Image: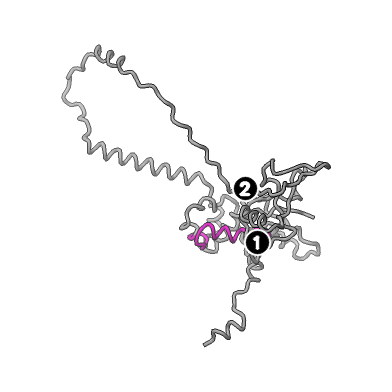
Amino acid sequence: MALHCCVPLCTSDSRYDIDKKLSFHNIPKDEKLRREWIVKIRRDENALFKITEASHVCCLHFNSNDFKKTLSGMRRLKNGSVPSLFNWKTCHEERPAPKQRLPFNNSRNDMVKEFIPPPFEDHDYAVSPLSLEEKFISLQQHNKFLEDRVLSLSTGSMKFGIQRFCMNDDMVLFYTGFRDYNNFLSVFNALQPTAVNMIRWSQVQRQRNQSSQFNSTAFRSESLLLIDQFFMFLCRVRQGFSENDLAVRFDISISSVSRFIMTWSNYLYVMLGILPIWPDKSTINKYIP
């Protein structure tokens, strides 16, 4: 039976573990420890995600001291172990303290200045020095240029994707329609367990008239992350960007854009189509005028 990790953004899967170095661990049944695991892995049980016997967390999210080896050499989790290693954690290096510098000795420079003869006032057409106001204006213009340069470099070096706007809720709302990044991430996390096994639209087209079963292939080999595929689909729906525009923004081919849009459209139609959007008959009768 194929096992995969249910932690968001983790792609561990037993089918691709050729060296058999990964181990997958069930979410504990103890209520207190179970709740702590759910908080750590940022999962909420809802209609699209239920914790079952098939829900596992891989060994990559535990420290080495969380494991113990049995007599047979198998690796097992110690009692009370909690996952703590995740992709969304960032390390902040402490800035080293400034080095203590010795005071600069100006006595030698003063001695040199004494032996340098003053310049002759040869001409009266020398350039007059800038006034304080002119210097201030020049510094302001140069500072504005540097600020614009830093901004263009910082935004231009980052690839277009949802991570680029994770700290800007206004841009997330503009591109996706979600109120902020956390709402976007919650919906994606609910879809991810089934989204990783989506069947490509091109594969459906090729095998439509064949009796063979579909080979459900996750988008692991694609150049675009699954979360950015979802983001690209929302950009298309929300702002109506053309496929050529999206191909330039995400740096992929137009055919890949078309394939992703078609696949996500069919997938979301199936997944979201099962959600009830109309009230039941008793509710209608209760509030009918």
Mark 2 and mark 1: span between their CA atoms?
A: 28 Å
Q: How is the image coloured?
A: one colour
The residue at the point 44 percent across, 27 percent down is 99
Q: Which mark is residue 263?
A: 1
Residue 24 on image: x %, y % = 74, 50
Label 2 residue SS: loop
Amino acid carrying label 2: it is Phe
| Residue 180 belongs to the span the image colors magenta | yes
Amino acid carrying label 1: it is Thr
- Location of the N terminus (image quadrant): bottom right
Residue indicated by mark 2: 86
Span of residues in magenta: 173-193
Q: Residue furthest right?
A: 72
Which badge, 2 or 1, comes first in the chain's sequence?
2
Q: Is residue 11 above or below residue 176?
A: above
Label 1 residue SS: helix
Residue 35 on image: x %, y % = 64, 57
